[in-house]
Image (cartoon, rainbow, N blue to C red):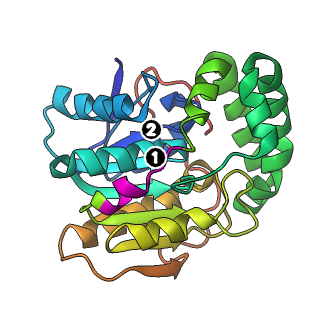
Amino acid sequence: MQIIDCGSGPPLVLIPGLQGRWEYHRLAVEALSSCFRVLTFSLEGDDLDGYAEQVGRVLSEKGIERATICGVSFGGLIAVRFAAQYAARCSALVLVSTPQPTLRLRRRHQIYLRAPWIFGPIFLAESPLRLRPEICAAIPDARARRRFALRGLRTLLSTPLSLSRMAARARLVGANARPDCERITAPTLIITGERGLDHVVPLEGPSEYARRIPHARVTVLERTGHLGSITRPDAFTDVIREFTTAALQRPASAPQISEGATARPGRSAPREGRQPDGAPDAVA
């Protein structure tokens, strides 16, 4: 297993989404590494318990006892399982645009999963149209949007996706995560985009996680939808940095919801920061 280890500061494990490849989250890794020691990897296995064990192996191989565990989209389900089963190793939990604990896939998505080698290309082909409103809101400058799109295309060409593995992970989305939520003891931040801009995951999920995870906090990242971790990586990093700094210094407080609490204005385009050695460009 290749482990990407970059940056300095408190350790943070970034768990990738349905694609399973860390490269598709590179912009988030770059931004987070400015104030965290970021560990990330590509998913191996075929069930949530195996993925949670993989997170534990990453920490053990790097000699880290506890870390902030950050899961993006499908990765959030893995983060929930890890935080529930390995509470002593999770100092804080961050769930980013994570499907709700008992999400039922739409009928057409269920059809896609029956023959991913046929329907998967259709799903990928329609993604730019589905995500365009969010990307335009997060990155208003046309040139910056073109750079963003080109980076994403380079990632897709250099890091091909396995449609069958993505389908296998998608089948796990419907697993009941409610019991795991109720076992979590770590301070928890739930990050979501604006209602109307996330065309991938229904926004009912954050409120359910907030109800079921003790002392969880929900923050809305403005001008983003599902891709906020890479369309506004600096604002995304600010939210996590401020949360972990406060959460690890004082006892957990009552659940709360804040609208764009820490997203700084004027930082809509991705930052051209330093990159992990040998890492190709990516988009999530």
Q: CA distance from mark 2 to mark 1?
A: 29 Å
The residue range painted magenta reads: 175-182
Does the segment drawn in magenta span residue 111? no
User: Element type at marker 2?
Assistant: loop
Q: Is residue 141 left or right of residue 201?
A: right
Total residue callouts = 2
Residue at the location (35% across, 28% down)? Answer: 50
Q: Which mark is residue 212?
A: none
- Up-down: is 193 above or below 255? above
Q: Quadrant of the N terminus?
A: top left
Q: Which residue is mark 2?
A: 274
Q: Is residue 162 left or right of residue 140?
A: left
Q: Please state the horizontal and vertical placement of residue 49, each as a whole percent of the image.
A: 35, 33
Work out whether residue 162 can be spotted: no
- Up-down: is 240 above or below 280? below
Q: Which mark is residue 77?
A: 1
In this view, the residue in front, 240 or 212, is 212
